[in-house]
Amino acid sequence: MAKRMKTGRRAFDADRVRAAGLAELYRRAQSSSDGCHCLNPEDEPQLQIIADVTDLDPLLDALERFAQHGTFELLDNFESFLMRIEMSDLRSAGMTYEEAIVKLAEDHHTSPSTITRRVRRTVKT
């Protein structure tokens, strides 16, 4: 019987979720006809998060930070980014905006108002 190879320490579950979110976003962009996927099309253009398969810099920056620090925790607003992906999935599944907010609040053990602030950013004048 072959001896099992040791793999050492593995990434935390939270980092695995973050990596999966990044991969999912770029896979969606890859499968779209124009090679782009907007995560929050309802927001103003300057606040939209767009994955473009011709511009991999955001993905590579995240991977470089992970390689350097061993975590995705240091990425700014990454939790909000993942919540926007979840929100997009829930809305695509047929939920209303309000229903999706309540579902995310339950899933993340936080208030609906906090979820609303995280998934929908607007410019204050």
Image (tube, rainbow, N blue to C red):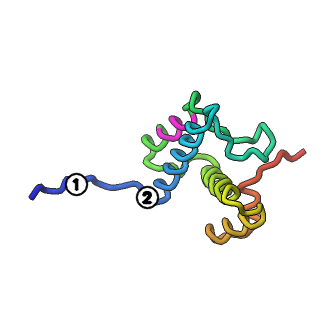
At a point 68% along the width and 55% down the height, the residue shown is: 92
Task: Name the secondary structure under disc 2.
Answer: loop
Residue at horizontal 79 percent and vertical 46 percent from the top: 43
Q: Position of residue 85 (x, y in %)?
A: 63, 52
Range of magenta residues:
58-63
Q: Residue furthest left?
A: 1
- Say which amino acid is labelled 2: Phe
Q: Is residue 80 left or right of residue 31?
A: right
Q: Which mark is residue 28?
A: none
Label 2 Cα neighbours within 10 Å, binned few <14 / some 14-19 / many ≥20: few
Camera-nearest residue between 15 and 55: 55
Circle 1 packing at 10 Å, graded few (<14), some (14-19), many (20+), is few
Q: Nearer the viewer, residue 53 or 59?
A: 53
Left or right of 70, for residue 104: right
Q: Which residue is mark 2?
A: 12
The amino acid beneath tag 1 is Lys
- x and y percentages locating residue 102 in the rendered image: 72, 69
Q: Is residue 10 above or below residue 32?
A: below
Q: CA distance from mark 1 to mark 2?
A: 17 Å
Of pointers 1 and 2, the one earlier in the residue sequence? 1
- Considering the image in quadrants, where does the N terminus appear? bottom left
Residue 6: mark in rendering: 1
What is the x, y in percent for residue 79?
61, 55
Nearest the viewer among 71 and 99 is 99
Mark 1 secondary-structure assignment = loop
User: Residue 125: horizontal and vertical position, in percent?
Assistant: 90, 44
